[in-house]
Image (cartoon, rainbow, N blue to C red):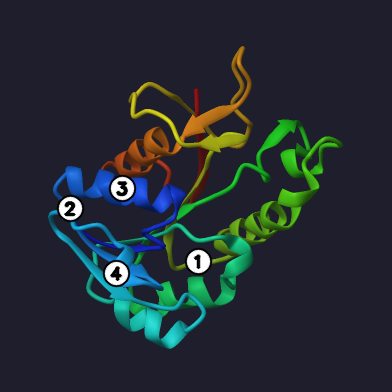
Amino acid sequence: MNVALIGATGNAGSRILAELANRGHSVTAIVRNPGQVPSLPGVAATKGDVNDQTDLAALLKGHDAVISSVMFIASDPTKLIGAVQASGMKRYLVVGGAGSLEVAPGLKVVDTPDFPAEYKEEATAGGVFLDALRGSDDLDWTFLSPSAMFVPGERTGEFRLGIDQLLVNDEGSSISFEDYAIALVDELEKPAHIRQRFTVGY
């Protein structure tokens, strides 16, 4: 596929970029600093601003799908989603957060008493972004939430998928950036969660 990846040099974005390249996809890596994009087969780095809706829409046109991997507090959901809509793209995959997942019926991770204060603004903004996607009626979107601990690790290919509940095992709730990238690109290649949020964890 011909994929536009917004935020290709971040923790998750860089792993998604590598996974896409390894699977033979053509990628337009849209970043603030194109010089930071690694040289990979089929990858073209392009400078773009997530807060410039008109410019971003022009960069997204002509692709088969758009993936965004950007901090929610560093972007405006109205502008980012609006750019995808204006570009004419339908397939939109978003690197989500764990904060909006449920740990019990009606209780989100972000609303639990022990949720770290330093992550609350980003987690809350992620929930706002998800709600904005759910309110759109012209995108085939997918929002993939990681587990609570979203960290560097190994590419094992061994993980579980869920929908709206936080995935937990005997060691807690975690997923590596590398395995997360596998799950996201799997969804790109074989869509199973159109207009849905889902989650991945060990």
Find the distance from the CA under tag 4 to the CA under tag 3.
26 Å
Q: Which mark is residue 16?
A: none
Give x and y (percent) for residue 73.
64, 65
- Taking the spot 34% from the left edge, 69% from the top edge, the residue there is 30
N-terminal of the two: label 1 or label 2?
Answer: 2
Q: Nearer the viewer, mark 2 or mark 4?
A: 4
Image height of 145 relative to 47, above or below: above
The amino acid pointed to by label 4 is Gly
Q: Residues within 10 Å of mark 3 (few under 14, many from 20)?
A: many
Can you say whether 141 is above or below 154 in the image?
Answer: below
Q: Is 164 on the left or on the right of 63, as rendered?
A: right
Residue 141 screen position, x and y as percent: 44, 57
- Number of other residues with Cα within 10 Å of mark 2, as a class: few under 14, some 14 to 19, many 20 or more: some
Badge 1 is on which residue?
Answer: 137
The amino acid sitting under disc 3 is Leu
The answer to whether the residues at label 1 and label 4 have Cβ atoms under 8 Å apart is: no
| SS under mark 4 | helix
Residue at the image position 61 percent from the left and 16 percent from the top? 171
- Tag 1: residue type? Asp
For the residues labelled 2 and 4, the Cα–Cα distance comes to 20 Å
Choose mark 3 or mark 2, whichever is in front. 2
Amino acid carrying label 2: it is: His
Sequence order check: which comes first, mark 1 or mark 3?
Answer: 1
Which numbered disc covers residue 25? 2
**What residue would you read off at disc 3?**
188
Q: Which SS class for mark 2?
A: loop
**Figure quadrant of residue 182:** top left
User: What residue is at 27 percent from the left and 47 percent from the top?
Assistant: 18
Circle 3 SS class? helix
Horizontal side of residue 29 vs 141, given as left or right: left
The residue tagged 4 is 35
Picture layout, residue 131 above or below residue 199: below
